[in-house]
Image (cartoon, rainbow, N blue to C red):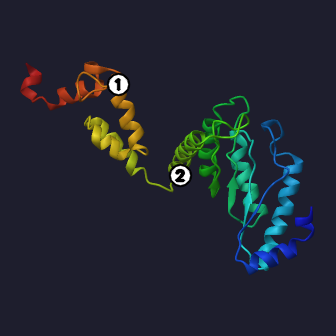
Amino acid sequence: NPLYENFDYVLEIAKEHDVVLSLANGMRAGSIADSTDRAQIQELIILGELIDRSREAGVQCMIEGPGHIPINEIPTNVMIQKKMCSNAPFYMLGPIVCDVAPGYDHIVSSIGAASSAKAGADFICYVTPAEHLALPSPEDVKEGVIATKIGAYAGDLASGQIDGSQDLAMAEARKRLDWEAQYECAMFPAAARAKRDERPPEEEDTCTMCGNYCAVKIVNEWLDQSDSDLIK
């Protein structure tokens, strides 16, 4: 590998131009069957050594992580990387947590993103529905970014990086059947509004899932009654 063989020269160039290096893992698994194997860990040890050399040269670095890994191995991978690489920023490539959902790998990756964020990964990589199948279209890219953003939010919520106030506001808006407030709380307001507008309910304060049998509406009506009305 000429880059590895001439790494000191690479560091000189990076230092001169103030470039941050992203050290990738060419030995990462191509399927979950090979995740966290000896080749991956051996390479991670080398990457840890390169991190030390980079810092000694005054060059910033981050480490790219595995792309195919089952959920139960994600915390282990993050912990090992942080130990081996002196707590360098860690960039997870998704990851894909199962290999049997082509066409929906953006959803599979979103699950991996949530788990990675919860485990302490610093960056996550979006994956499109076209992954493993074709070159992604602009719409594929959009869907991939949306799915990954949701996964990142879920991971940050679980790890305490965000306090859940937006989720609480959504819950309160749903209790009030306040649809405009729900759109304001939504991560993707336009999509939420468009979905409801596609299937408008007969009663504006309900939706087409339950209509007038909406449990929230019925409970609110009972709670709004006076004690004397309830006795009657």
Residues under labels 2 and 1: Cα distance?
Answer: 33 Å
Q: Residue at x 72, y 55 (%)?
A: 79
What quarter of the picture does the C terminus occupy?
top left
Between 163 and 147, the residue placed more toward the observer is: 147
Tell whether 107 sits left or right of 77.
Answer: left
SS state under label 2: helix
Question: For this rendering, which residue is in front, 79 or 33?
Answer: 33
Residue at mark 1: 199
Which residue type does callout 2 highlight? Answer: Asp
Q: Is residue 224 above or below residue 63?
A: above
Disc 1 crowd rating (10 Å Cα; few below 14, some 14-19, many 20+) is few
Query: Which residue lies at the image location 63% right of the left edge and 47% below the top edge?
Result: 126
Q: Which residue is mark 2?
A: 156
The N terminus - image quarter:
bottom right
In the image, is 174 to the left or to the right of 29? left
Q: Secondary structure at mark 1?
A: loop
User: Measured from the top left, where is residue 15 in percent x and y?
Assistant: 75, 79
Residue 27, numbered label: none
Mark 2 or mark 1, earlier in chain: 2
**Horizontally, is 102 left or right of 168 in the view?**
right
Answer few, some or many: residues within 10 Å of disc 2's Cα (few below 14, many 20 plus, some between 14 and 19): many
Instruction: Give the side of residue 43 with respect to residue 190, left or right.
Output: right
**Which residue sits at x=70%, y=49%?**
93
Residue 35: image location, x then y, percent: 80, 42
Tell me which corner region of the image, top left, top right, bottom left or bottom right, holds residue 231: top left
- Amino acid residing under circle 1: Arg
Query: Do the CB atoms of the residues marked 2 and 1 lie less than 8 Å apart?
Result: no
Figure label count: 2
